[in-house]
């Protein structure tokens, strides 16, 4: 199994964003995780397609857009045009989840569905063929630097089982990404519950040496194999 680390630029220095994304990818990050908050679906306001477009030329790595906005559909078009590669949204934020998922793929991106800690997994029941990624929130969305909620590990195991069954039947891969509170001292436990893609914001950007933290995260992942 391949593990991916997706540094969340929510914790980066926004005054030097181009340099930050280049540095964190050079330091071993796999994807740039891009948190979009609208002060409506979540109580915080961050960045939009203009900023995505601005960082696009700085890295070849996939830009993994996490939409915490309501409504969703219009922003899909803007982010697809601004160089996003993966777009995830929260099912509660779309009136027509199936349509939004198709919409993301129609605009050339991989589609992800994001689950808050209390969101039921029933949203996965009829759309597995429509998604490329499941994003499990280990905290309530809105802020970086929160502690992960251990109960979610049970939910993660559940999703892993669903994905494994689906992949066995179809041969198609679906990424299982986790977001919130991921650190070097808990990433092994989170991997054991089934995650393969790890967002980390404050764990990486709050340290002076990104390469060292990313190395520590990978070592913790490898030692738990
Ligand atoms: C939270 C965001 C996360 C956040 C993670 O709503 O979706 O991506 O940046 O930050 P840490 O890793 O610090 O919890
Ligand atoms: Zn996120």
Image (cartoon, helix red, strand yellow):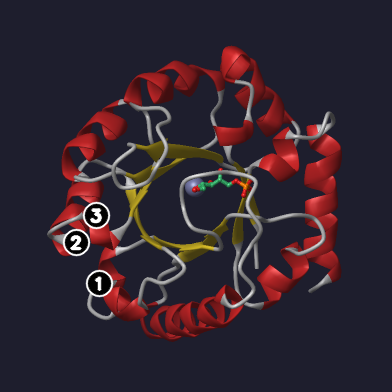
Contact? badges 2 and 1 (CB < 8 Å): yes
Q: SS class of the residue under badge 2?
A: helix
Q: Earlier in the sequence, mark 2 or mark 1?
A: 2
Q: Residue at x 75, y 34 (%)?
A: 206
Element type where label 3 sits in the image? helix
Could you tell me how far apart the alpha carbons at marks 1 and 3 are, in whole angstroms? 16 Å
Q: Identify the residue shown where x is 67% and y is 69%.
A: 190
Look at the image and tell me in which quarter the C terminus lies: bottom right
Disc nearest the viewer among 3 and 2: 3
In the picture of the structure, the residue carrying the numbered disc 2 is 97
Q: How far across and down, in percent of the image, does residue 56 sit?
A: 46, 23
**Residue located beneath label 1 in the image:** 127
Q: Nearer the viewer, mark 2 or mark 1?
A: 2
- Is residue 34 something one can see in this rendering? yes
Q: CA distance from mark 2 to mark 1?
A: 9 Å
Q: Residue at x 62, y 14 (%)?
A: 16
- The extreme top residue here reads 15
Q: Which mark is residue 93?
A: 3
Q: Is residue 63 above or below residue 50?
A: below
Of marks 1 and 3, which one's residue comes earlier in the chain?
Answer: 3
Q: Is residue 141 above or below residue 137?
A: above
Left or right? Give the position of 123 relative to 191: left
């Amino acid at each position: 199994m391949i593990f991916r680390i997706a540094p969340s630029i929510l914790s980066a220095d926004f005054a030097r964003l181009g340099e930050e994304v280049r540095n964190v990818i050079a330091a071993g990050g796999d994807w740039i995780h891009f948190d979009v908050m609208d002060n409506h679906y979540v109580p915080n306001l961050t960045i939009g397609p203009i900023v995505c477009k601005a960082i696009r030329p700085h890295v070849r790595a996939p830009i993994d857009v996490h939409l915490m906005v309501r409504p969703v559909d219009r922003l899909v078009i803007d982010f697809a045009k601004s160089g996003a590669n993966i777009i995830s949204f929260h099912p509660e934020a779309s009136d027509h989840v199936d349509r939004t998922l198709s919409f993301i793929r129609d605009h050339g991106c991989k589609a992800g569905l994001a689950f808050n800690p209390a969101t039921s997994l029933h949203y996965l029941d009829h759309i597995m063929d429509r998604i490329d990624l499941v994003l499990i929130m280990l905290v309530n969305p809105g802020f970086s630097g929160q502690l992960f909620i251990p109960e979610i590990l049970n939910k993660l195991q559940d999703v892993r089982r669903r994905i494994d069954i689906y992949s066995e039947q179809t041969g198609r891969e679906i990424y299982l990404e986790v977001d919130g509170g991921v650190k070097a001292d808990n990433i092994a436990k989170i991997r054991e519950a089934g995650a393969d893609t790890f967002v980390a914001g404050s764990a990486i950007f709050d340290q002076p040496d990104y390469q060292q933290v990313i190395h520590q995260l990978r070592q913790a992942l490898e030692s738990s194999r």
